[in-house]
Every structure is written in structure tokens, then in C-alpha cells.
């Protein structure tokens, strides 16, 4: 076996210690994660990825009430009775599974953004391949051996793992709680997860040494593994220190709920001062091919228990974050490798499907629904699936650009191409001036006329490549994508029709490569 192949196959992470009875794995530094850590130090922001493993039935979680009649024909044996569907604030068209009262309450409080119809073109329905696509950020036919948060290891840190942790980067930059390691942090040559599994490794850390390896071809690999183990133990120490500085304050964490147990640890570590910006937690059991519901009461059964565990865990976590005074620093996002079919099967379950809803939780979200309810055909076949509305990488783009505020070029490099930024998070713009601070007069002109009542023209310059102009309302919510295409280098104009825009103040943002410029426009009656 070649050394390069050996290192790529090195087990990623393991268990050095337990917190609240759960294994905690640590991930070492990567360039993008280093950037996120700097953002975390500046604004304290933390992202928790919540993986729903197995393929979640989104139609049983976020229920399109306006499609109830065709849903009854397509999945009558598992459908939640309409009078049991939980209502959502400010809409009568969409509701939640009756077990999700906690998330219903958070939605009413403006802490939830639900993105409808999330998938990608030509979706894959294999658990392993679909999970790989979501983790690597790839196209359906694109096979990548790096995670979407690990693209820059060779370019930015060619000597890794030498020299880490250090005074500038004392804490692990990603933590996965629970067994297994997410490939989202896979580097080019090695998986960035690390583990400690022997007493000698601990004493090597104390002495700054590793056990001597035999003088054989495999000796170099053994030395490398021992170095990784030593590095992991150092990260374990800072995690243990952080855990000792904070105590969970919420009394709402449910018993016998694995996700709640994981999130309980996250809250403790964030409140304990750990600078780690990324946490990965997970739930399993979503592969509900049969007995998805109790056939005598469809509000109960396997999926109902999953929805209850998800809702109660997230509700308790955010209650804890509020009591610990860290709620403004955290955002959490659910995702599953795929959704499930519109039509149920004869076993009281659902088979592998395509698009699904994604939920994002934070005080910084644009609360409500993004996209529309899926349209259910009057006559549904076993091959029918929910239509794609939002590419999953547009949500990743929102996390990078609007939550962690990484540069546009970094975001595009991570995602391997440019994607529209889903309006999951609120924007920060200066509402007092037409020219927002930092706007480049040569790159983005003031629209003319301004104010306008019917049409206006935006003049701008592109350096070439993907060029995007997005329109936001005064609250920072995306209301329209005016332009999103590859442009030749030079000066351009685009006409904007008012359409159904109500009168008021708006902002338009030009994104081209690493440059962003924003200006204000006014719509009048």
C-alpha cells in the first residue's frame, strides 16, 4: 500500500474521554475552519449540524395543508389527520407533525427558518452515495474525496499536523459528539479526525515524545498515527477544561433522548468558553420503509417518536442556550441524505425519495418558510417525488456568507462554484445611506431613477465570471434575485421591474468574485 493511500485510510477519530456518558471526538485544524474560528473569536458564532440519518420523511414533518386532498389519496394509510396538524404562525397553508410542539413554539418566537424542497439536480437515492454528496458538497455525478470544509488543507497548511494546537489555535476547530466520524472534514491526504486510545499516548504528550517506531516501511505510518494521537490528547485537555467551567441550566432536556444528550454537551462546551465554531451531532432511525406510523393512530409510531425527540432536544438546547447567555451565538441546521416518496407503500412506510425540508434555528434567521409547499399530483405513482426548489449548497452558502461572514471567493472555492445565497439569515446593511459603507462607485452605480414606481435601471461593472445581484427588504430578507449568471468583463446594465413589490426601502447587493457592494433603492406608489 502506498503511503498516501495509507494515510487517507487512517481512521479519522475515536474516543479519548466521555462527557455525560457520550464519546467526544475532536477534529484538527483546516484552513476554512481556521477562518471560521477567527470569525468565532470575533463574534462568537457557532454552527451545529444535526444529521438525520436514514432519509427523513419531510411530508410527515412539514405538512402541506393546502395539498391535503391529494396527500390523502397518495398516503392515506400514514397521513396525519388534518385536525391534528400543528399550526404555524402567519400561515394556514403549512403545519408541523403533532409531536413537534417545541419547534412550533420556537417558530412562533421567530427562531426557525424552514427551507422547502431542498435537494440537487439528478438526486441519488442510495444512503451511502447521497450522504457522501451532502458531506462533500458535490454534484450528483461528481465524486470527491474531500469534505466541503476541507478543501484548503494542502494549499494553506501543507505541514499539517505539525505545530497544532498552538497559542493562536488552542482549541479544536470542529467537534463531533457520538460514535463515527463525519466525512465533511476529510482532507486531501488524511481524515482530520483524531483519537487517543492508550495510556502511553498520554505520557507521550506530557513528555513531548512519541513511542519509537520500528525501522520498517510501516514505521513512518506508525509514527504519523502516534503523532496524531498525541495531538488529539492535547485537544481533549482543552475540551475537558471547558466542560468543567459550565453547567447546563435548562431543566427541559428529556431522558432517553440521544440527540438531547449530544446537544446538552454542546451547550456546556460553548458556555465553557471553547472557541470551536463547528459541532456535528446526529440522530438515526429515519429509514422508515415499514411501520412508519401506528396504523391505528397515525400520530404515533416510529416517525412520531423521531419527530418528538428532535423537537424536544432542540427546544431544550435553545432554552439552555438562553439561560447560559449564549443563544445569540448559536445556529443549528437539520439535514438528511434525502427525503422520501410522496406515495406510501403497503407496509405502512415510505421509500427513498428526493427533496426534503431543511430547518435552521437561530435568533439571526429570517423566520418563516422559504419556498412554497410541494405540489402533489392528483394521481400519484410510486415514482413521483417532491420537486427541487433549493439546491442544498445554497443553504451552505448562507451559512458561510451570512452566518460566518467568510469572503465570497472563499465561499465559492468551498462550494466549487457559485450558488445563490439562500435568505436563511438576516442581512446586515446600513439603512441610513444610499451608498452602504464600502460600496465601490465604479463597481455598482446608484439605480436610476431612484425613487421609482414602475421600473429602474442598475448599472454595474463585472470583472467577469459569475455575477449576482440580489434585492433585500429593509429587514434583510431576500425578495428577488435580479441577476445570477456568468458575465464578460466590462460595464453592464439590468432593468428592474417593480412587479408586486410594496412601497418601501430596499437594498441591492452585487456579488462578483470576492467583491460585494450594496446600495439602497426606494419604491414609491
Image: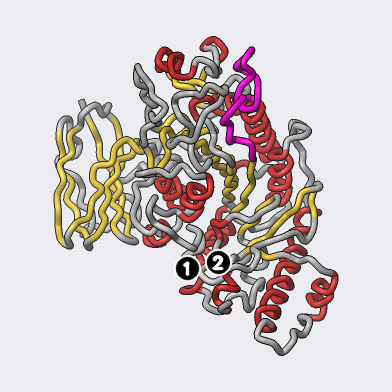
Q: Residues within 10 Å of mark 2 (few under 14, many from 20)?
A: many
Q: Residue at x 21, y 48 (%)?
A: 446
Counting residues from the start of the chain, the first of labels 1 and 2 encountered is 2
What's the magenta region? 284-304
Is residue 397 located in the magenta-colored stretch of the structure? no
* Relative vertical location of residue 496 with respect to residue 66 in this rendering, above or below: below
Residue at the extreme front: 346
Q: Is residue 80 visible?
A: yes
Cβ atoms under marks 1 and 2 closer than 8 Å? yes
Residue at left offset 27%, top offset 58%:
440
Local secondary structure at mark 1:
loop
**Spot occupied by residue 432 in the image (x, y as percentages of width and height):** 35, 43
- Residue marked by disc 1: 152
Which image quarter: residue 165?
Answer: bottom right
Separation of residues labelled 1 and 2 (CA atoms): 7 Å
Q: Residue furthest top?
A: 83
Q: Quadrant of residue 473?
A: top left
Main secondary structure along the magenta-highlighted residues = loop
Q: Quadrant of residue 54?
A: top right
The picture places residue 261, in percent across and down from the top left corner, at 74, 41
> In which quadrant of the rendered image does the N terminus lie?
bottom right
Q: Measuring 69% from the left and 34% from the top, which residue is drawn there?
A: 316
Query: Could you classify mark 1 by the number of other residues whose Cα lies within 10 Å: few (under 14), some (14-19), or many (20 or more)?
Result: many
Residue found at x 79% / y 58%: 17
Q: Is residue 287 magenta?
A: yes
Indicate the position of residue 201 as horizontal and vertical percent values: 80, 73
Q: Which residue is mark 2?
A: 30
Asked if residue 90 shows in the view, the reply is no
Amino acid at each position: 500500500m502506498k503511503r498516501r493511500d495509507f494515510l487517507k485510510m487512517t481512521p479519522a477519530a475515536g474516543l479519548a474521554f466521555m462527557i455525560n456518558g457520550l464519546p467526544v471526538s475532536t477534529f484538527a485544524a483546516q484552513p476554512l475552519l481556521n477562518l471560521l474560528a477567527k470569525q468565532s473569536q470575533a463574534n462568537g458564532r457557532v454552527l451545529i449540524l444535526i444529521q438525520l440519518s436514514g432519509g427523513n420523511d419531510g411530508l410527515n414533518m412539514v405538512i402541506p395543508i393546502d395539498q391535503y386532498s391529494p396527500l390523502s389519496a397518495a398516503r392515506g394509510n400514514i397521513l396525519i389527520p388534518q385536525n391534528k396538524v400543528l399550526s404555524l404562525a402567519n400561515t394556514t397553508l403549512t403545519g408541523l407533525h403533532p409531536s413537534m410542539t417545541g419547534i412550533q413554539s420556537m417558530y412562533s418566537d421567530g427562531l426557525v427558518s424552514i427551507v422547502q424542497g431542498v435537494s440537487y439536480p439528478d438526486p441519488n437515492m442510495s444512503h451511502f452515495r447521497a450522504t457522501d454528496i451532502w458531506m462533500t458538497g458535490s454534484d450528483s455525478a461528481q465524486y470527491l474525496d474531500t469534505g466541503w470544509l476541507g478543501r484548503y488543507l494542502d494549499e494553506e497548511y501543507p505541514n499539517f499536523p505539525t505545530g497544532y494546537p498552538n497559542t493562536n489555535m488552542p482549541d479544536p476547530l470542529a467537534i463531533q459528539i457520538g460514535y463515527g466520524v463525519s466525512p465533511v472534514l476529510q482532507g486531501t491526504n488524511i481524515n482530520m479526525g483524531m483519537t487517543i486510545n492508550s495510556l502511553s499516548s498520554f505520557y507521550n504528550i506530557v513528555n513531548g515524545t512519541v513511542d519509537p517506531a520500528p525501522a520498517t516501511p510501516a514505521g513512518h505510518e506508525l509514527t504519523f498515527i502516534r503523532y496524531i494521537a498525541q495531538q488529539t490528547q492535547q485537544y481533549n485537555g482543552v475540551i475537558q477544561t471547558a466542560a468543567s467551567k459550565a453547567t447546563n441550566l435548562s431543566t427541559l432536556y428529556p431522558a432517553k433522548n440521544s440527540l438531547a444528550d449530544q446537544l446538552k454537551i454542546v451547550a456546556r462546551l460553548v458556555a465553557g468558553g471553547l472557541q470551536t465554531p463547528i459541532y456535528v451531532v446526529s440522530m438515526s432511525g429515519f429509514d422508515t420503509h415499514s411501520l412508519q406510523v401506528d396504523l391505528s393512530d397515525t400520530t404515533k409510531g416510529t416517525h412520531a417518536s423521531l419527530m418528538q425527540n428532535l423537537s424536544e432536544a432542540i427546544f431544550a438546547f435553545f432554552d439552555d442556550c438562553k439561560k447560559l447567555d449564549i443563544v445569540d451565538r448559536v445556529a443549528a441546521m437539520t439535514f438528511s441524505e434525502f427525503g422520501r416518496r410522496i406515495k406510501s407503500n403497503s407496509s405502512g412506510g415510505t421509500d427513498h425519495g428526493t427533496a426534503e425540508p431543511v430547518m435552521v434555528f437561530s435568533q439571526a434567521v429570517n423566520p418563516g418558510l422559504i419556498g412554497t409547499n410541494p405540489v402533489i399530483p392528483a394521481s400519484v405513482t410510486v415514482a413521483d417525488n417532491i420537486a427541487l426548489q433549493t439546491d442544498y449548497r445554497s443553504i451552505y452558502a448562507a451559512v458561510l456568507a451570512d452566518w460566518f461572514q467568510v469572503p465570497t471567493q472563499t465561499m465559492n472555492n468551498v462550494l466549487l462554484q457559485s450558488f445563490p445565497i439562500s435568505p436563511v439569515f438576516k442581512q446586515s446593511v446600513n439603512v441610513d445611506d444610499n451608498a452602504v459603507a464600502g460600496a465601490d462607485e465604479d463597481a455598482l452605480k446608484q439605480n436610476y431613477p431612484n425613487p421609482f414606481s414602475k421600473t429602474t435601471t442598475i448599472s454595474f461593472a463585472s470583472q467577469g465570471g459569475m455575477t449576482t445581484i440580489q434585492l433585500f427588504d429593509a429587514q434583510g430578507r431576500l425578495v428577488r434575485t435580479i441577476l445570477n449568471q456568468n458575465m464578460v468583463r466590462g460595464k453592464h446594465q439590468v432593468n428592474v421591474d417593480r412587479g408586486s413589490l410594496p412601497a418601501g426601502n430596499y437594498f441591492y447587493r452585487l456579488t462578483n468574485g470576492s467583491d460585494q457592494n450594496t446600495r439602497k433603492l426606494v419604491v414609491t406608489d
